[in-house]
Amino acid sequence: MQDVSSDAVTSDGSQDSITSCQFSADDIGDPIAADYDECLGYLGDPPPPPVATQTCISYVWVLTGWESCSDGIQTQPFGCQSNDGGTIATVDDADCIDEGPKPDPITQSCSVSDTGQTDCYNSVGIIVCPSPGEAYYGQDANYTISPPSYTKLDENGEETVSDWIMVKDNVTGLIWEVKTDDGTIHHQEDKYIFDDAQSVFIADLNINTFGGYDNWRMPTLNELVSIVDYGTDAPNINAEYFSNTMSWYYWSSITVPGTFDNMAWSLDFRYGIRGIIWRTEALHVRAVSGENPTQDFTDNGDGTITDNNSGLMWAQDTADTDGDGDVDEDGDDEINWQGALA
């Protein structure tokens, strides 16, 4: 007779080494299991209870949440996760060392800053921001995605806390000119007709490599919107960084096609309102430096479209709100703001 041990997995995910009994004799053949009592005469005292317990925790690399946008890129890194008998936990990366090297993070474009809106509204006025399932839930102030983040830059493009002449938008990566009140070409009150905004103002910045850059340009309408702070007004911009901003219209680089090609889009920094204005009118201009991406969309084949510049996914079709299978042009599919939120 002899005692042997084997492993058994318990309900809590641990593993025990269990002592058992085998009968063995030279003239009988292979060992066979025997009742424990049969071993007592050979082994003496009963063996100790199960020993050599070891845990059965598994580890795996998993994707974590998306990080905030930085320089137009959003990252989703991998982290180490443990499974201890069904209990999932995030653990140190070192615990996953036997699972192979840590995978590279996933990245995607993102160029949309949060609006800065913090107040919630109903059809009458400001309300306490609603919770999921309540009326008016889903409006802008219910979400904070890619909160605005700026860095002040000096004349050499270096970070500073005073005497800054440029601002870097850390979300989009764009660098913006800061206006002054000193009578220079950056003076806050200066205005230009549309054509001169590029051929005179922008040209001068590039010739003189303002801030060390020679790729200054007029911003697109969407780029102007990206620095609007809809949580304030007159001007609705973060004045801590964008000082000397006028509460009036600023030119974008976007012209109006077709019949109104002698007009261009602008943005009012009093209330954040977009408008088209005759190109012969004189408006303010704020220069921007950085890549100006072209439109880039992907049809996902499931009724959605992904904007590869912003990372946003859109419904491909206008909502069929009356459920008749067709988007009508007679107004049947139009709903109010509260209905759209729901």
Image: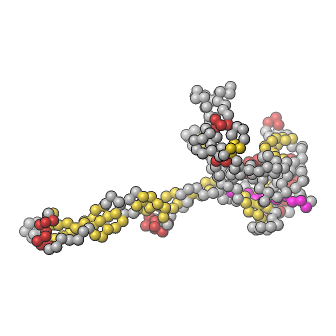
What secondary structure prevails in the magenta region? Answer: loop
Q: Would residue 3 be found to the left or right of residue 215 on screen? A: left
Residue at 73% in and 60% down? 150
Quarter that holds the N terminus: bottom left
Q: Which residues are magenta?
A: 171-182
Residue at 68% in and 27% down? 331
Between residues 255 and 160, which one lies in front from this camera angle?
160
The outermost residue toward the right is 183
In the image, residue 164 lies at what x, y percent?
81, 65
One can see residue 91 in this view: yes
Q: Would residue 184 be found to the left or right of residue 321 on screen? A: right
Quick check: 160 above or below 303?
Answer: below
In the image, residue 304 lies at what x, y percent?
59, 41
The outermost residue toward the front is 128
How many numbered marks does the figure carry?
Answer: 0
Residue at 11% in and 66% down? 38
Q: Would residue 119 be found to the left or right of residue 257 on screen? A: left
Within the image, what quadrant is residue 57 found in? bottom left
Residue at 82% in and 35% down? 259
Quick check: 322 above or below 187?
Answer: above
In the image, residue 48 lies at what x, y percent?
23, 71
Between residues 237 and 307, which one lies in front from this camera angle?
237
> Residue 181 in magenta?
yes
> Residue 110 in magenta?
no
Within the image, what quadrant is residue 37 found in? bottom left
Quarter that holds the C terminus: top right
Quick check: 177 above or below 19?
Answer: above
Q: Would residue 247 be found to the left or right of residue 339 on screen? A: right
In the image, residue 317 lies at what x, y percent?
62, 36
The outermost residue toward the left is 27
The outermost residue toward the bottom is 44
